[in-house]
Image (cartoon, grey):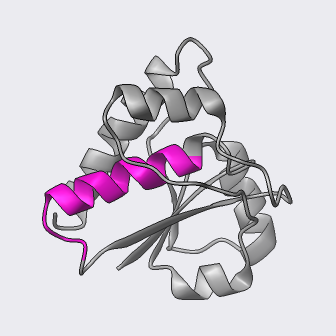
Amino acid sequence: MKILFVCSGNTGRSPMAEFVMRKLVKDAGLSEKISVASAASKPTDGGILHQGIAAKLRMENIPFESHFARTITKADYDASDLIVCMDEKSLNEVKNLIGDDKKLSKLLDKDIPWDKNVFRTTYTDIFSGCEALLKKIGG
């Protein structure tokens, strides 16, 4: 199964979800069955991981690597089993690119905020959403 997380710029929330989910998948022993990536819902190729997001991942002991933003493509859509958006705006932008589809969803029933207060709420929402998603898909 391939999961693609999407936010507007692919420098904050979607890569955070990518790295959190990779750790959860690895800890569950499912790395051979589940792969995780992230992309932007609008053209923003080349941006790097936001330094506040990187600091929060370090604080939470979530491994991460160099990350460069990229925009979702039709090939991403074709290769993904699930496309999980961080908010309604990103969901609608992806729908405009590829159409409404059963592969598309939001991580939570609410939008995940861009919380600049040490990204506590952003991380908490993403972590709980990823845990629930992993449980739902059989992890």
Place of residue 132 in the rendered image (x, y in percent of width and height, measured from the top left): 26, 48
Classify 6 as above or below 113.
below
Residue lying farthest to the right in this orientation: 43
Residue 120 visible here: yes
The magenta stretch is: 14-31
Classify 35 as above or below 133.
below
Q: How many marks?
A: 0
Quadrant in which the C terminus is drawn: bottom left
Q: Nearer the viewer, residue 93 or 76?
A: 76
Residue 113 visible here: no
Q: Nearer the viewer, residue 34 or 82?
A: 34
Place of residue 86 in the rendered image (x, y in percent of width and height, measured from the top left): 57, 45
Quadrant in which the N terminus is drawn: bottom left
Q: As drawn, is 72 to the left or to the right of 27? A: right
Q: Is residue 17 magenta?
A: yes
The structure residue drawn at horizontal position 34% and vertical position 58%, both measured from the top left corner, is 22
Residue lying farthest to the top in this orientation: 117
Image quadrant in which you'd find residue 49: top right
Q: As drawn, is 28 to the left or to the right of 103? A: left
The structure residue drawn at horizontal position 55% and vertical position 32%, both measured from the top left corner, is 53
Place of residue 127 in the rendered image (x, y in percent of width and height, measured from the top left): 34, 38
**Main SS class of the magenta portion in the image:** helix
Residue lying farthest to the front in this orientation: 66
The structure residue drawn at horizontal position 76% and vertical position 65%, both measured from the top left corner, is 71
Place of residue 24 in the rendered image (x, y in percent of width and height, measured from the top left): 25, 53
Q: As drawn, is 47 to the left or to the right of 111? A: right
Q: As drawn, is 12 to the left or to the right of 109? A: right
The structure residue drawn at horizontal position 67% and vertical position 87%, both measured from the top left corner, is 75
Q: Is residue 57 magenta?
A: no
